Structures are given as structure tokens and as C-alpha cells.
Image (cartoon, rainbow, N blue to C red):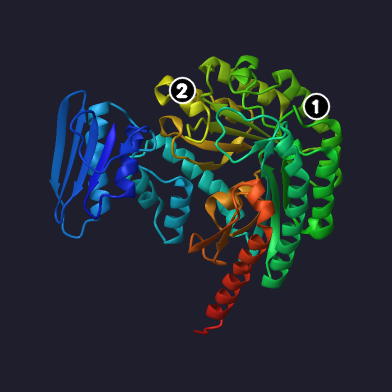
Amino acid sequence: MQIILRGTAAGYEAEHTARIFFPDAEKAPQVPAAGDFVLAVSHAQTDFVLLRRGGSLRWRSALRAPGADAEYALCSLLYSLLKEQTGQQPPWGMMTGVRPVRIIHDLRAMGATEQQVEDRFLRHFACSPQKFALAREIADRQRPLLDAADPMDCSVYAGIPFCPTRCSYCSFVSRTVGDKATQALVQPYVDALCRELTEIRALADRCGLRIRTFYIGGGTPTSLSAAQLEQLMAHIAATFDLGGLAEYTVEAGRPDCTDAEKLRILKQYGATRISINPQTFSDQVLRNIGRRHTAQDIIDCFAAARAAGHDNINMDLIAGLPGDTVEGFAGSLEQAVALDPENITVHTLTLKRASNLVVEHRAADYDDVAAMLERCTLLQRAGYAPYYLYRQKGTLQNLENTGWSKPGRECLYNIYIMEEVHTILSAGAGGSTKLVIPGKRHGKIERIFNFKYPTEYIDRFAEILDRKRRVEDFYEHYAAQKAGQP
């Protein structure tokens, strides 16, 4: 399937409306002589959409009402044609954005009534009542946490781009620590990361920022040696006021590199929340995705974490992994609930071109993924409630990722980064600092990117520190505006 767009209103939204139905479609400059395609054309006052599929042509045209949103009118016309011709009922309707909950926050901030919020989802976006109810429940749960945030709060993220092996579904920039070339990078990387974190603390102080949460992610942070992990954790403890943090998370995701000593180090140096991420409790599915451990290894790692004193643990599961079934996924949910972690995050498999999995499998092979997510009612019965949600391009059946927690155990960092309510200062290869105007929910955001790959991060480290000066420029500009200066 190819996508052809014509006219000023035929852009990003029209392209991704078509991808709701044809996620593998390629954008093309011209109508092909043969093969399937979607054409969307926006004229001054009319819209035209056409689908050629299996040798058959179907089209629609409409006269746009005066003052109507041209982009929305074209997307709505396209959506209705593709929905009719494919027979699909997208659960999120014609939404193409990744943050449905944010729409609710924004509408409420603008003074919309609850009926207007509901109409926006059900009528404007053609979202299903079930998905709207999920988004609204999450927005309600987040509201007091977001309202309590200080305008000058921020969070810090530190990335470890190394893993023991690469999972087949992974699209992140990470290197396996088993090869000698990568092993030679790890220590210089940790040294540079510590230096960047020192600069981030100084920047935060100079800008008057209060660091609210700290998150070490990856990759797999526990793929570092115990000595390297202790070096990083000790440096953070000496550099930052851990007592002032509301939350300090470290991903200890994989049992094939997370042992009792590393779990002790995480606890000793102040981590208040960790993630142990099974993805599945099926040994066969673990083998399918390239994991070199068993489900029992995950259970043993969880027990070791509890023995080390960790009392706030998240576990990730993925719906739609190759070889999994609805009953198999339900079994993974049941096993996770039996372990009784404080958080369970349920992701829907996303097929990304940078992963190995997308080469081997197609979205059509995963018809049961929606039924898998329906089994999450088990989490509600076990006392978990949804507290954050996001969507990704390429996610099977256009579905979502949802974080579930026990009452009062919501991960603040996940909420802050997903709803984009305050600045995230990011360190490490591939890091993306997000600068948010204080006190303005969902206002203008500026980004500062670190170099993507570990080698480049190490070799060009001085440039990264130079880029970080833009953080001060951003807050100086904000302070000047607040004071009424030009």
C-alpha cells in the first residue's frame, strides 16, 4: 500500500490517518500505475479521497463548510472511507497522537465541560467509549498529582545504552556488553556520564530548579559491572540531594545481569523504585525474543530484590510477542499479580523498523493482541488501577501502553514525562532534554539532544556540555519575560 498526498491540508495527520488502517504503507510522490494506494487531496473548498485495493476503486468527495478545519475535514473523510472499506473499528478512532490523556488535561485547563471533553473523544475523534473511559479514569487519577507540582520542578534522566543481549522487538540504541569492543566503551561511558550529571546538578542550581524525580533507564543499567554500577550510584548520591527527591527509579530489568550484589548497591545508594521486566513468563516466548533467561530466573530475581529491601517494584509485560497466545498472556498477568509488585506496566508490541522483529513478522500475525489487553481486568480485580497511558506509531492494532499501580504507588516520573508538565534534564547517549515553560501545562517545549551512539557521546563529550548551556538560556529568557523585559 502506498500513500499519496496532495494539497496544503494533506500532510502529517492525513498520512497517519491512513496508517491506522495500513501501518506498513509507504508514502509515495506519484500515483502508481499498479498496486494498492490511498490518495488524499485537499483543494480550496473540497476534499477528495480514493482507495485502490485489490484492483477495486472506491472514493469520496465533500464540500468543506466555510471556516471548517481543512486538515480535520480531510482526515475525517479519509477515515470514514477506510473504515468502511476495511471493516476495521479502530479503538482510538482517528486519533494519531501519542498522548490521549493530555487532551483531557488540556480541555479541562481551557474550561471545557465534562460533556465537551466526552464529545471531543466520541464524536470528533470517533474514539470508542471504552478507550475514552480508560483515558478519563487516568486523567482523574493524575489530576491531583499534576496540580501539586511546583512550576520550577524538574526531573533527571540518565541513560545506560548497554544490554546483555538485544531483544528482537527492541528499537533503542543499545549495545550488547558481551563483545570486546563494547566492553571497552563501558568504563569511559560511565566516567563521561558522571561528568555530565555533575554539570546537570550545577545547571539545575543556577536555574533555580528543584529536582523532583530521578530515573536511570536504558538499555539495561544493571548490565554495568557491580563496580561500575556502584561508581555511578555513589556519584549520584554525592552530587544530588536524594533526600529532596520524591522518587528515584532504576531499571534493573533483566535477571541475566541483575544479581543480589547489584540489587544491594541500588538500595544502598538510595533507589526508591526499581523495574524488573519479564515481558512474559513463557520460556518459549522468552526464547522467541532472544532472552537468555527463564521465567524462573525472573521470579528468583524478584525474590532477591525483596530480600534486598526493595519495596516499590515495577514489572513490564508486552502483549503480542511472537508465539504468545491470549491464554499465555493471561498466564503472565496472573504470575505477575502473584508476585505482588507495586506497579505492572502493560505494553502493546510495537513493530519498529530499527528492530529485528519487524523484518520477521508482520502486524497481520497478531490478531489476538486486543483480546490480550482485555485480560487486564485481572489487574483491576487484584487492586491495581491505571495511572498513565501512551501510544506509539507502529503499535499493533493502534492500541496503547498502560501503567497500572497500587494506590499511592504511581510512578511520578512516568506521569511527568508523558504529560510534559515540567523539564526533564537528560544525560547519556541518545538523551533528549525537554525544556518546559514553568507553570504552563503543555506550553512550548524546547529540546536539546545528546549524541545518539556511545562512541560519539564519549568522543564529542565537550560538545554535549556546550549544548547544555541552552538550559540556562531558556530559563534566563523565561525570567526576563516574567519580569516584563523585552
The residue indicated by pointer 1 is 303
Q: Which residue is depicted at the point 27% across and 39% down? A: 3
Q: Is residue 373 left or right of residue 468?
A: left
| Earlier-in-chain disc, 1 versus 2 | 1
Task: Give the quadrant of residue 279.
Answer: top right
Q: Does residue 137 appear in this view? A: yes
Secondary structure at badge 2 equals loop
**Mark 1 or 2, closer to the camera:** 2
Q: CA distance from mark 1 to mark 2?
A: 34 Å
Q: Which residue is depicted at the point 43% across and 37% down? A: 131
Residue 252, percent across and down? Answer: 73, 36
Amino acid beneath label 1 = Ala
Between residue 123 and residue 212, name the one nearer to us.
Answer: 212
Amino acid beneath label 2 = His
Residue 138, percent across and down? Answer: 53, 44
The residue indicated by pointer 2 is 361
Between residue 437 and residue 32, name the one nearer to us.
Answer: 32
Dot 2 surroundings within 10 Å: few (below 14), some, or many (20 or more)?
Answer: few
Above or below, comparing residue 430 to residue 372 in the picture: below
Residue occupying the far bottom of the picture: 485
Q: Which residue is depicted at the point 51% across and 18% down? A: 326
Q: Is residue 273 left or right of residue 426?
A: right
Residue 300, percent across and down? Answer: 78, 23
Q: Quadrant of the N terminus?
A: top left
Secondary structure at badge 1 equals helix
